[in-house]
Image: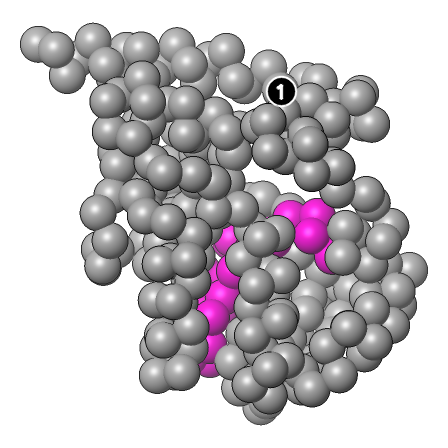
Amino acid sequence: MKEEFKTTDILGFPFVNTTFSSFMNQIKSRIEQRKNTFIITANPEIVVFAKKHPKYQNIIKSSNYITPDGVGIIKASHILNDDIPGRISGFDIFLNLLKWGNANHKSAYFLGAKPNVINDLKTTLNHNYPHLKISGIHDGYFNYDEQIVKDIQKTQPDMIFIALGYPKQDLFINKYRSISNGLWIGLGGSFDVLSGNTKRAPQFWINHHIEWFYRLLKEPSRLPRMMALPYFLYLIYQQKEKQRK
């Protein structure tokens, strides 16, 4: 990982320690220069999963940037006395790049989500970002990678947005990122939110760092996944104790 920013070690993962605006300026510069870029947006759940799966852990560490997508990462940086200024979430990166890409006539490829979500996403993109060139758009239900890979290789988009959920999206990016020198980023459920199929938390919840709780109320099935947080905090305090020695 090329460290153009100060980083904060969270359980062995170097999270970028900078503001959202500084990070986005750097990313846009890399896109303009056609530098191959792989961004991982990680929360405590992803970190805990990666700690248990060495292959995935190595993929995360091979990315260009790991951003703090989750208030738990920010809290961990405070506990470790190496404060990260704030979240740099995948959805916020996505929105920022779409707006910038539209203003600068950039191209983008979209892969992931359900077919009905993709249909709604097309409508949203055409309405809100009419000057953004859509190099390709495909749902996440496919049996073979070959045609999608050929499309990306042929069109060479500036930005490749993959919304297959972790770890699948990151495994896909790691396998194929060499075919295009664009920006590659995994976005989880961002297509669902942008298309209007899933509502993002109201700004009040986001501002008070409890967006996760809003999502839990809306999707109680997420509770088992949330159980990774106590274990994450346990590991953070272990790291803090080691730093004292």
Residue at x 55% of width, y 85% of height: 104
Q: Which residue is mark 1?
A: 226
Q: Is residue 201 above or below residue 4?
A: above
The colouring scheme, among rainbow, by chain, secondary structure or one colour, is one colour
Residue 146 appears in the figure: no
Q: Position of residue 137 (x, y in %)?
A: 74, 74
Whether residue 171 is in magenta: the answer is: yes
Q: In what quadrant of the picture does the C terminus appear?
A: top left
Q: Is residue 11 above or below residue 93?
A: above
**Disc 1 residue type?**
Met
Residue at x 54% of width, y 57% of height: 93
- SS state under label 1: helix
Residue at x 35% of width, y 58% of height: 22
Residue 136 appears in the figure: yes
Q: Quadrant of residue 33?
A: bottom left
Q: In what quadrant of the picture does the N terminus appear?
A: bottom left
The residue closer to the viewer here, 79 or 135, is 79
Q: Quadrant of residue 80?
A: top left
Q: Position of residue 39 (x, y in %)?
A: 44, 57
Label 1: how many Cα within 10 Å (few below 14, some 14–19, many 20+): some
Residue at x 75% of width, y 42% of height: 200
Q: Is residue 209 left or right of residue 120?
A: left
Q: Quadrant of residue 23?
A: bottom left
Whether residue 10 is in magenta: the answer is: no
Q: Which residues are magenta?
A: 168-191
Q: Position of residue 99 (x, y in %)?
A: 62, 71
